[in-house]
Image: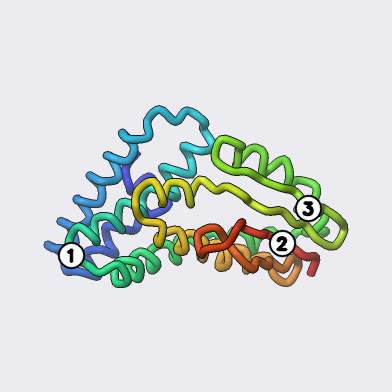
Amino acid sequence: MTLKESKFYFLQDDCCEEFGTEAGMERYQKTEQRYQALQDEYQKEQNPAIREHLLRNLFPPLAYYQTLLSDGFSQQAALEFVEKETEKAALQKKAAMKSMTRLPFTYLMYRLFVKKFMTKNFPTEGWETQWLECSGTSIRFHLNRCLYWDICQKEGCPELCQVYCKNDDIAFAGLLPKIRFERSQTLGTGGTCCDFCFRKG
């Protein structure tokens, strides 16, 4: 897979706009090379759901971040550049979430399918999910282990995980006013878990 096939298909244009055409293309090509190297590094991963996360969501920002650091950018500057890109992707997901609120009984439908969705898309190979409540008013669970946090640590950039965490806040805001997303901590921001809560609006 290439970057243009991921959820960050717009990265090339943004690099050229941010750094100028020549420097931007060079930085984009280095990011693509790093992206391909990450795929090679984790090619043994066979779980289709995890591969989807890695190739489409996780590796593109990671490759861009590592490229920026290798080009001499400070950690803070690199995080800011990466966050611009992840926010664009999260806003697209927010729009998709917003479409769900047009359906009748949005919370009820969300509640009925959330466990099946989590089992399929967040398998035990990458996440440890602890269910606390799935009632008529609240859906609550803790993620005690997270693929994104594990990979960021393994790649030597745990600080990057906070960028992925912010994506949830942006994307799930699209469920308002039918469903209100709440979270007080994440593994990526120093918490003991990611404490997800979806309340009926």
Q: In this view, does 156 lie above or below 48?
A: below
For badge 3, the amino acid type reads Leu
Numbered-mark total? 3
Q: Which of marks 2 and 3 is nearer the N terminus?
A: 3
Residue 94 in view (yes/no): no
Q: Which residue is drawn at 60% across and 58% down?
A: 192
Pinpoint residue 18: horizontal percent, then vertical percent: 24, 70
Q: Residue at x 44, y 31 (%)?
A: 45
* Real-space CA distance between mark 2 and mark 1, rounded to the nearest whole angstrom: 39 Å
Relative placement, left or right, of 200 versus 92 is: right
Q: Which of marks 1 and 3 is nearer the N terminus?
A: 1
Callout 2 touching callout 1 (CB < 8 Å): no
**Secondary structure at numbered mark 3:** strand
Of the pair 88 and 55, the residue shown nearer to us:
55
Q: Residue furthest left?
A: 22
In the rendered structure, find residue 197 and report the number of the disc placed on it. Answer: 2
**Secondary structure at numbered mark 1:** loop
Quadrant in the rendering for residue 12: bottom left
Q: How crowded is mark 3: few (under 14 residues within 10 Å), some or many (20 or more)?
A: some
Q: Which residue is drawn at 51% across and 38% down?
A: 50
Q: Which of marks 2 and 3 is in front?
A: 3
Disc 3: which residue: 132
Relative placement, left or right, of 157 versus 15 is: right
Pinpoint residue 188: horizontal percent, then vertical percent: 50, 59
Relative placement, left or right, of 196 versus 151 is: right
Q: Residue at x 36, y 51 (%)?
A: 60
In the rendered view of the protein, which quadrant contains the N terminus? top left
Callout 2 touching callout 3 (CB < 8 Å): no
Q: How crowded is mark 2: few (under 14 residues within 10 Å), some or many (20 or more)?
A: many
* Real-space CA distance between mark 1 and mark 3, rounded to the nearest whole angstrom: 44 Å
Quadrant in the rendering for residue 73: bottom left
